[in-house]
Image (cartoon, rainbow, N blue to C red):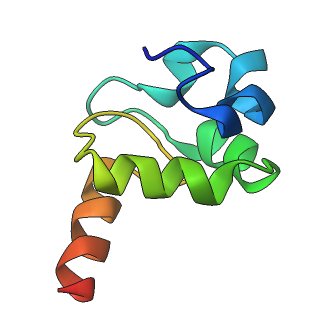
Amino acid sequence: MLPIETLPWAAQAKCLQADPETFFPEKGGSTREAKRICALCEAREPCLEYALDNDERFGIWGGLSERERRKLKRLAS
């Protein structure tokens, strides 16, 4: 993980107060709790932007799963 100084928005991220495993569920596991936390997070938009810009392949970022981020990128192309 990158230092917070590199990602200023990350200091406000609600995920810092949660179990990291919530955001990286096992295949077929529920993403509901991670998405609930993301929905309340002030850093949701920059987090999602970071994930899209850096092609993050795993986990919930900005409230979206890897599959949802791929779909979003396809639709934006």
Compared to residue 48, the image places residue 70 above or below, namely below
Left or right of 26: which side holds 16?
A: right
Q: Position of residue 31 (x, y in %)?
A: 51, 41
Q: Position of residue 47 (x, y in %)?
A: 55, 47
Left or right of 74: which side holds 29?
A: right
Is residue 64 at least partly visible in the picture? no
Q: Residue at x 45, y 17 (%)?
A: 2
Q: Residue at x 39, y 32 (%)?
A: 29
Compared to residue 70, the image places residue 58 above or below, namely above
Compared to residue 38, the image places residue 14 above or below, namely above
Is residue 3 at least partly visible in the picture? yes
The number of numbered discs placed on residues in the rendered structure image is: 0
Q: Position of residue 53 (x, y in %)?
A: 31, 54
Q: Nearer the viewer, residue 1 or 27?
A: 1
The quarter of the image holding the C terminus is: bottom left
Q: Residue at x 33, y 63 (%)?
A: 68
In the picture as drawn, the residue positioned furthest to the front comes out as 5
Q: Residue at x 24, y 73 (%)?
A: 73
Compared to residue 52, the image places residue 11 above or below, namely above
Q: Position of residue 14 (x, y in %)?
A: 77, 32
The quarter of the image holding the N terminus is: top left
